[in-house]
Image (tube, rainbow, N blue to C red):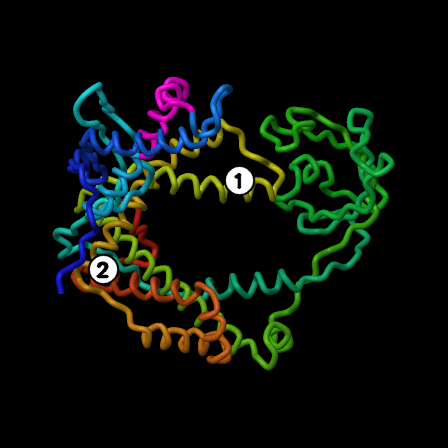
């Protein structure tokens, strides 16, 4: 069956030029009678609604009405015809615009047709060329004993207890202090004193002056500490100032770490021995490293795809990408109470533009790979993935399926599967070489 073509309005001729892969210039020629007909209809309506002293409503002579509102009607007529011409072009040439068209080269004399250009950005038609033999490095996955030890140590730290001691404070001890702001820092605390503040001596989160000033302090000691606030401090009232605090040490407590034994392992995960706990940690580290290596291989393939295929990205797509990033930056800044300045926003746009262009080039090329290779995902594939995720996380399959189908999660899963298959296609044609585990495989490509 032949494809149905939309009815084209008589008297409107549109042609399309492509100065850029992402740009279309619609050249419009509109017959004089199209304008005259539209104008006549608006004038007739204006006459019917016009009311002027000495005439009944709707009986004002046409020439009088035209003299009074003709300029306005002519402008309204042109404003109505330009969108009509644009819609005609979109349907006739199957345009998929990314932004609203801009009007250029408008010409309309006393006689002859009305002509103008409509310039718009469109999603570029991308074709992927050579994608054979991509050099991809695969890091060897090695989980060393020290990697497991580091995780065990973090678990010990998370279960540490503090015991009050009668000695000078050492790094890692927890101190309880009362802070008394000096005259230059009055009003910072409740009633002039900030009571029962706890800090771990030597912690990176402390102001350096407190780590230095409270070193070797004992319960009952009182020390004055000068705190220098940097010029870039987020609190405007503190930027560049030096404030003095009187510190009264009320308590010194030593950190007590649990022994690594079966009781500790069982506390971390019920029923586990130390050997079983370490085995689970090693397995989890192995899986995480495998995910990292797989992600690195995907990124190498994508960067090589971008390097081998030139793609011009529409400026409006880049702007929207940066707008989205700025919105996220503003959200995080609002949460921390450190809003960004217009200068910082401008800097973000300038420094982020190359990354945005590269990311969008990759997106367009991956779409082209999926289209050219006819990569598809069936509904059954998504259902299988739902069951796989449910099993991995211990969810009830039907309940998880209901959750996925109730929102946009299913669409996301489908896209993830499409993306995965596109990467698998690229990697199937790549030249993969194994490299040591500590190799920075992305350094050269980025």
Instruction: Using the image, tell me which numbered label, if any, was put on residue 169.
Output: none
Please state the total of marks drawn on the protein image: 2
Find the magenta span and give its range: 60-80
Q: Name the residue under label 1.
A: 330
Along the line of sight, the residue nearer the viewer: 56 or 255 = 56
Q: Can residue 67 be seen in this view?
A: yes
The answer to whether 114 appears left or right of 251 in the picture is left
* Percent of width and height locating residue 424: 24, 64
The residue at 64%/46% (across/down) is 203
Residue 392, quarter of the rendered image = bottom left
The residue at 25%/56% (across/down) is 137
**Relative to 325, residue 138 above or below:** below
The residue at 39%/19% (across/down) is 64
What is the quadrant of the N terminus in the image?
A: bottom left
* Percent of width and height locating residue 427: 22, 61
Residue 97, quarter of the rendered image = top left
**Relative to 385, residue 187 above or below:** above
The answer to whether 274 appears left or right of 128 in the picture is right
Q: Does the magenta stretch include residue 62?
A: yes
What is the quadrant of the C terminus in the image?
A: top left
Q: Name the residue under label 2.
A: 370
Secondary element at image label 2: helix
Along the line of sight, the residue nearer the viewer: 49 or 107 = 49
Please tell me whether the stretch drawn in magenta is mainly helix, strand or loop. Answer: helix
**Relative to 13, residue 263 above or below:** below
The answer to whether 129 appears left or right of 67 in the picture is left
Residue 262, quarter of the rendered image = bottom right
How crowded is the residue under tag 1: few (<14 C-alpha within 10 Å), some, or many (20+)? some
Secondary element at image label 1: helix
């Amino acid at each position: 069956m032949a494809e149905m073509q939309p009815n084209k309005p008589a008297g409107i001729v549109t042609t399309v030029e492509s100065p850029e892969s992402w740009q279309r210039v619609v050249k419009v020629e509109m017959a004089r009678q199209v304008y005259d007909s539209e104008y006549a209809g608006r004038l007739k309506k204006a006459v019917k609604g016009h009311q002027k002293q000495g005439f009944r409503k709707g009986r004002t002579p046409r020439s009088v009405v035209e003299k009074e509102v003709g300029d306005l009607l002519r402008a309204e007529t042109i404003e109505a015809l330009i969108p009509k011409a644009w819609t005609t072009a979109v349907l006739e040439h199957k345009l998929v615009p990314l932004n609203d068209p801009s009007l250029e080269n408008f010409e309309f004399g006393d006689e002859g047709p009305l002509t103008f250009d409509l310039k718009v950005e469109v999603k570029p038609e991308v074709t992927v060329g050579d994608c054979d033999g991509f050099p991809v490095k695969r890091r060897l996955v090695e989980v060393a004993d020290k990697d497991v030890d580091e995780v065990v140590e973090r678990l010990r730290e998370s279960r540490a207890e503090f015991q009050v001691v009668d000695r000078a404070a050492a790094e890692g001890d927890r101190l309880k202090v009362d802070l008394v702001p000096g005259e230059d820092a009055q009003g910072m605390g409740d009633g002039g004193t900030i009571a029962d503040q706890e800090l771990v001596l030597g912690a990176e989160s402390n102001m350096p002056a407190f780590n230095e000033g409270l070193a070797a302090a004992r319960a009952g000691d009182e020390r004055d500490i000068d705190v220098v606030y940097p010029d870039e401090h987020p609190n405007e009232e503190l930027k560049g100032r030096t404030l003095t605090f009187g510190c009264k040490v009320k308590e010194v407590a030593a950190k007590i770490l649990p022994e690594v034994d079966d009781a500790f392992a069982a506390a971390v995960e019920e029923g586990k021995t130390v050997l079983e706990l370490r085995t689970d940690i090693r397995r989890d580290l192995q899986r995480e490293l495998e995910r990292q290596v797989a992600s690195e291989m995907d990124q190498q393939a994508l960067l090589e795809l971008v390097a081998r295929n030139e793609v011009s990205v529409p400026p409006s797509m880049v702007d929207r990408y940066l707008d989205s990033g700025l919105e996220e930056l503003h959200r995080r800044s609002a949460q921390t109470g450190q809003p960004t300045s217009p200068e910082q926003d401008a800097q973000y746009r300038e420094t982020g533009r190359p990354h945005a262009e590269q990311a969008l080039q990759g997106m367009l090329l991956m779409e082209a790979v999926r289209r050219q290779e006819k990569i598809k995902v069936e509904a059954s594939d998504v259902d299988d993935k739902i069951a796989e995720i449910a099993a991995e996380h211990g969810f009830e399959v039907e309940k998880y399926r209901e959750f996925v189908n109730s929102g946009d999660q299913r669409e996301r899963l489908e896209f993830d599967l499409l993306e995965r298959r596109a990467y698998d296609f690229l990697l199937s044609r790549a030249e993969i070489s194994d490299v040591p585990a500590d190799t920075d495989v992305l350094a050269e490509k980025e």
